[in-house]
Image (spheres, rainbow, N blue to C red):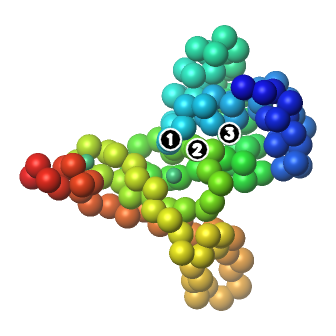
Amino acid sequence: MPHEDTAQVIRNAGLRATAPRKVVYEVLQHAGGHRTADEVARLVAEAGKPLPRASIYNVLDDLTGAELVMRADRGPGAAIYEVADAWHHHFVCRSCGAVIDVPCVVGSKPCLDADIPGAVIDEAQIIFRGLCPSCAAHR
Ligand SMILES: [Zn+2]
Ligand SMILES: [Zn+2]
């Protein structure tokens, strides 16, 4: 994995390309899919560059704020993080917990408007719930 590229991606997003930011971004990108902060901590440790838990959360916050990483609050349960090119929503299976990406028809946030006088809305993320295809087929 070319480190220069990761550093450039992080700098292009307006952040300093620190070692913790690079390793967290790289393990998330390499692992793919949706990962909790705990999983990210484990992957970072497995990559031979363990970081304190607080640093993992700080770095995930930084990367999410710079929109390099997307965070989904699937609640209940830990938030999940992913490296994503396009803003999207999630389906969470009530039975097995599978997380499936749902494309956003608008593609950028906020894709929904809410009538709250005086409020400034910058994000709307939808969690679809139900049974995933495999659970639905075996009910
Ligand atoms: Zn399922
Ligand atoms: Zn996703």
Q: Earlier in the sequence, mark 1 or mark 2?
A: 1
Q: Which residue is mark 1?
A: 33
Does dot 3 land on a helix, a strand or a loop? Answer: helix
The answer for how far apart the CA atoms under marks 1 and 3 are is 15 Å
10 Å neighbourhood of mark 1: few (<14), some, or many (≥20)?
Answer: some
At x 68%, y 39%, the residue is: 60
User: Which quadrant would the N terminus be assigned to in this image?
Assistant: top right
The answer for how far apart the CA atoms under marks 3 and 2 are is 10 Å
Q: Earlier in the sequence, mark 3 or mark 2?
A: 3
Q: Which residue is mark 2?
A: 82
Q: Amino acid at mark 1?
A: Gly
The answer for how far apart the CA atoms under marks 1 and 2 are is 6 Å
Position of residue 23 in the picture relative to residue 40 (left or right): right
At x 63%, y 60%, the residue is: 86
**For the view shown, which residue lies furthest in the left direction?**
139
Q: Amino acid at mark 3?
A: Leu
Which label number is shown at residue 60?
3
> Does the CB distance between marks 3 and 2 fall below 8 Å?
no
Q: Is residue 120 above or below residue 53?
A: below
Q: Earlier in the sequence, mark 1 or mark 3?
A: 1
